[in-house]
Amino acid sequence: MQSLLPTSVQIPKVLTIAGSDSGGGAGIQADLKVITALGGYGMTVITAITAQNTLGVSRIQDIDLDVVEAQLDAVMTDIGADIVKIGMLASPEIVQVVAQGLRKHGIKRVVLDPVLRATSGASLGGDDTAQAMINELFPLATLITPNLDEASLLLGRDIHGPNDFALAAQELLDLGPQAVLIKGGHLDASHTQITDFLTWRSVEDHLEVVQSKVFKHYRVNTTNTHGTGCSLAAAIATYLAGGHDLEHAVAKAIAFVEAGLEAGKFLSIGEGPGPLWHMHDFFPTALRNEKDIL
């Protein structure tokens, strides 16, 4: 039966391919919160189930490869996606299935957050998975968003700080993606300012050129940082799907996450490092008036 409702309103459709975080702070759950908060329609391909809370990851169960494939086929053959955001892929085999699915469905815009290790230190991939990402997904990626640890693992050498970012980003760009964002948030807390480094390919006068942009922003004084990497990549993807260019999408996503960290520092969720607050625009958090607590 044909619907009588109007169907002319279009919103960005964002497909996230990632692992499930039972604690709700990262992974699929964080991605969906971000996509929704920024006005997109979120869809999922779950690659793994984690038993996880604010104290860490206690167990990981990969999803069967044919089920990963079936989820991607189901979404793309009916709804489609304006962009795909990829997070946790815990094995080389899952990487390959996802890459095959992207090619099969002709997906042109991909934001890849190469999640290889949890903040707690738990391995979420490894060297074989990293190499599979380089071989299979980097050539398909519009943007990759590694943090310092992930960039070091991908390049096989240590990256110590902002002075290393330009060279590291160029080396990662040479591996195939159209753009690289190296995130500086994992530097120790003595660095009160965070530096993120973006480099990307563009065409000017029929010639390919490489451009770069440095984003500097202050470190929010909070331990509630769980899910920041997932949230940033999901925000970039949603802004890109909404029509923003890469440079502005990254800038707006950084501002969104920074606001989420500011709002999240007032929340008490779990016994360990909690998540940022993704819904800060809709449900602001703050301490009571300072006069009331003095």
Image (tube, rainbow, N blue to C red):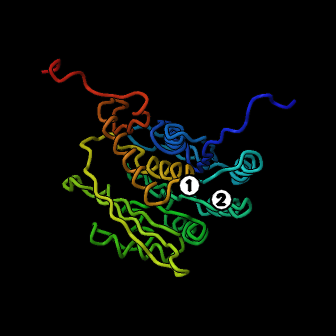
| Residue 101 location (% of width, % of height) | 70, 59
Residue type, mark 2 in image: Val
Q: Secondary structure at mark 2?
A: helix
Disc ID at residue 287: none
Residue located beneath label 2 in the image: 98
Above or below, 98 against 78 in this view is below
Q: Residue at x 58, y 68 (%)?
A: 132
| Residue 285 location (% of width, % of height) | 33, 28
Q: Which mark sits nearer the N-terminus, 1 or 2?
A: 1
Q: Quadrant of the N terminus?
A: top right
**Nearer to us in this view, 210 or 145:** 210
Q: Residue at x 49, y 63 (%)?
A: 144
Residue furthest to the front: 205
Residue furthest to the right: 1
Compared across the picture, whether 141 is left or right of 171 comes to right
Query: Mark 1 Cα within 10 Å, few/some/many (few <14, many 20+)?
Result: many
Residue type, mark 1 in image: Ile
Q: CA distance from mark 1 to mark 2?
A: 9 Å
Q: Residue at x 33, y 70 (%)?
A: 165
**Nearer to us in this view, 112 or 157:** 112
Residue furthest to the bottom: 207
Q: Residue at x 52, y 69 (%)?
A: 178
Query: Mark 2 Cα within 10 Å, few/some/many (few <14, many 20+)?
Result: many
Q: Secondary structure at mark 1?
A: strand
Residue located beneath label 1 in the image: 86
For residue 3, what is the image quadrant?
top right
State yes or no: discs 1 and 2 in contact (Cβ < 8 Å): yes
Above or below, 23 against 205 in this view is above
| Residue 44 location (% of width, % of height) | 63, 44
Above or below, 49 against 237 in this view is above
